[in-house]
Amino acid sequence: MNRRSLSWFLALVITTLLPLWWLIHPAATWAAMANAQDPPPAHYLCEGEPLIAEVHIGAVDAPGIPNTAAGTVPGAFIVLQWRGVSLQLPRTNNAGIPSYSDGRWWWQALDPGHPDFAQRRGDWENYSCEAQP
């Protein structure tokens, strides 16, 4: 097979198979499209004061990391508004239930009705939180 024939054959294979990608991997494609929208903010009382938690679905910046639980992917983050402070915490690379931390603040909703919220000040200072309707 000469070089020109090989180039023509490869071009034919690529132009034929590339449009079929959606048929080959439909679950991954549809899952990504379904999770593209941020969920509505959640409201809590933490230490008796209102807290608003807004999860933002991020772009997939490390697809090899298996941490897409609950529809979040690498690059996702959460914004917590509490006591007049707005915290933007990046999604950790921990497997399992999504957790968010900047090294000082920590948020994880293993129990959505009573999420884990803490701050490191030498030792961890844990805040009691309860979901609000």
Image: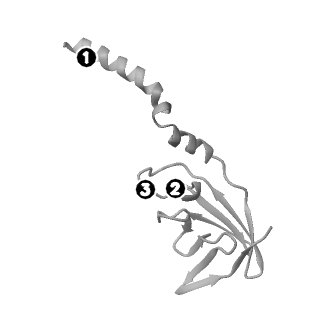
Q: Is residue 107 left or right of residue 46?
A: left
Dividing the picture into quarters, in which one does residue 70 lie?
bottom right
Which residue is disc 3 drawn over? 65
Q: How many residues crowd mark 2 within 10 Å: few (<14), some (14–19), many (20+)?
A: some
In what quadrant of the picture does the N terminus appear? top left
Image: 12 above or below 53: above
Where does residue 47 sit, x and y in percent of width and height? 73, 82
Three-letter code for the amino acid on which mark 3 is drawn: Ile
Categorize mark 3 by other alpha carbons within 10 Å: few (<14), some (14-19), many (20+): few
The relative height of residue 37 versus residue 120 in the rendered view (above or below) is above
The alpha-carbon separation of the residues under discs 2 and 3 comes to: 8 Å
Tag 1 residue: 6
Residue in the image at 59% along x and 79% along y? 119
Choose between 125 and 23: the one closer to the eye.
Answer: 23
> How many numbered circles are shown?
3
Q: Amino acid at mark 1?
A: Leu
Q: Residue at x 54, y 69 (%)?
A: 102
Residue topped by disc 2: 68
In the rendering, at what x and y percent does residue 54 appear? 68, 61
Task: Please state which amino acid type lies under the numbered disc 2.
Answer: Thr
Outermost residue on the left side: it is 1
Callout 1: SS: helix
47 or 15, nearer to the observer: 15
Distance of label 3 from label 1 (alpha carbons): 37 Å
Tell me where residue 19 appears, x and y as whole percent.
47, 25
CB of mark 2 within 8 Å of CB of mark 1? no
